[in-house]
Amino acid sequence: MITPFRIDVPQATLDDLRRRLDDARLPAPLPGDGWDTGVPVSWLSDLVDYWRTQYDWRAIEQRLNDIPQYTTEIDGQTIHFLHVRSAEPDALPLLLTHGWPGSFVEFLNLIGLLTDPVAYGGSAADAFHVVVPSLPGFGFSTPIVGTDWGTERIARTWAELMNRLGYAKYGVQGGDIGAAVSPEVGRVDPEHVVGVHLNGPGPLPPMPLPDDELATLTPLEQDRVARINAFMAEEFGYIAIQSTRPQTLAYGLVDSPVGQLAWIMDKFREWTHPRTTLPDALLDRDTLLTNVMIYWLTGSAGSAAYVGYAQQGGWGRTPANSGVPTGAIVFAHDVGIRRYTERENTVTRWTDVDRGGHFAALEEPELLLTDVREFFAGLR
């Protein structure tokens, strides 16, 4: 059964948030108060003040509820999703999967462009019906049920969702966790998936790379390997925590909105491009805060961490190639390398671009949209 869903946050919940923000105890700045030790107090305190005094959740809530939303139960798990059908009769269904620390909010500005291209100066031939599920354990796809939410189970859940919606043929797209789940949808449902499109695709090469293999890479690919090494040395801590102690971490994040904000903003600064530009200079503050609100209002910090990084049983295996045509776009921040992606996927389109970061749908929606349209143009 599919049930219409509306976001309706009790006023008491918003009042509680306001009290917590008013009474927040921020840490003393560390020497220099720079990003090398984490989110600077000087920067975050200003964003917290904006959250307290200017951010209007009720206006955002109304805009979100203008988008058709639903829930359904699959394999015991509540799945929340957006579903916007195009008026174009030949539109292709497209399933979009977000990552961590993102949410369905990532795709909001793409929905109109995908479903109604004519209204934005495009062609009716590029129209999509859009389905945007919230990953299990994320946002309104909570509480989490069961212990084995690896990419294959999520992929089977997505395939069942598309079946319930009556879509016999569809495409899939995703980044971050979505870039791991989307190819898996092609593997579990190859008779129905016409194409897989990824931003920031994996898998990553086995590290460290031998010198002779490294020498065969292009300068661009060698730069990506160097940044993978830097990530493992400087940024891996959050994965270590989320994949081993998600419950312990959750106590702090679901109790402190400032803690939740800082945990997510750290990644928006590190993974947007250029890295030296502050997140709220690249993306508007309301968008950043709305994404954080999805985590805060649903208390999903722990289950999102658990689903995103605790299911490591399949790591290190090489999945079977589904044979489904796969396209990839790699923005400036990301580190996908074609030869490693091709070990598991039938790559028919690969695009490297010199700008944009990990949150492609938010940072470079037009570039992502163009690549998605051109990839699926021959697969309809």
Image (cartoon, rainbow, N blue to C red):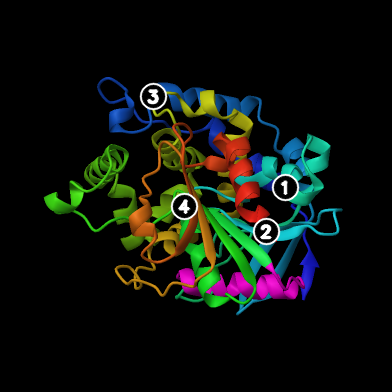
**Residue 89 in view of the camera:** yes
Q: Residue at x 42, y 49 (%)?
A: 252
> Dot 1, crowdedness within 10 Å: few (<14), some or many (≥20)?
many
How far apart are labels 4 and 3 at the CA level?
A: 21 Å
Q: For mark 3, what is the residue? A: 276
Magenta segment: does it hold 153? yes
How far apart are labels 2 and 3 at the CA level?
A: 34 Å
User: Would you say 155 lies left or right of 313 here?
Assistant: right
Q: Position of residue 145 (x, y in %)?
A: 54, 74
Q: Which residues are magenta?
A: 150-169
User: Would you say 276 lies left or right of 99 here?
Assistant: left
> Dot 4, crowdedness within 10 Å: few (<14), some or many (≥20)?
many
Pointer 4 or 3: first along the chain: 4
Q: For mark 2, what is the residue? A: 94
How far apart are labels 4 and 1 at the CA level?
A: 20 Å
| Amino acid type of the residue that numbered disc 2 sits on in the rendered structure | Leu
Q: Position of residue 103 (x, y in %)?
A: 58, 50
Vertically, is 48 above or below 86?
A: above
Q: For mark 1, what is the residue? A: 114
Question: Disc 2 vs disc 3: which is toward the camera?
Answer: 2
How far apart are labels 2 and 4 at the CA level?
A: 17 Å
Pointer 2 or 4: first along the chain: 2
How far apart are labels 1 and 2 at the CA level?
A: 9 Å
| Amino acid type of the residue that numbered disc 1 sits on in the rendered structure | Leu
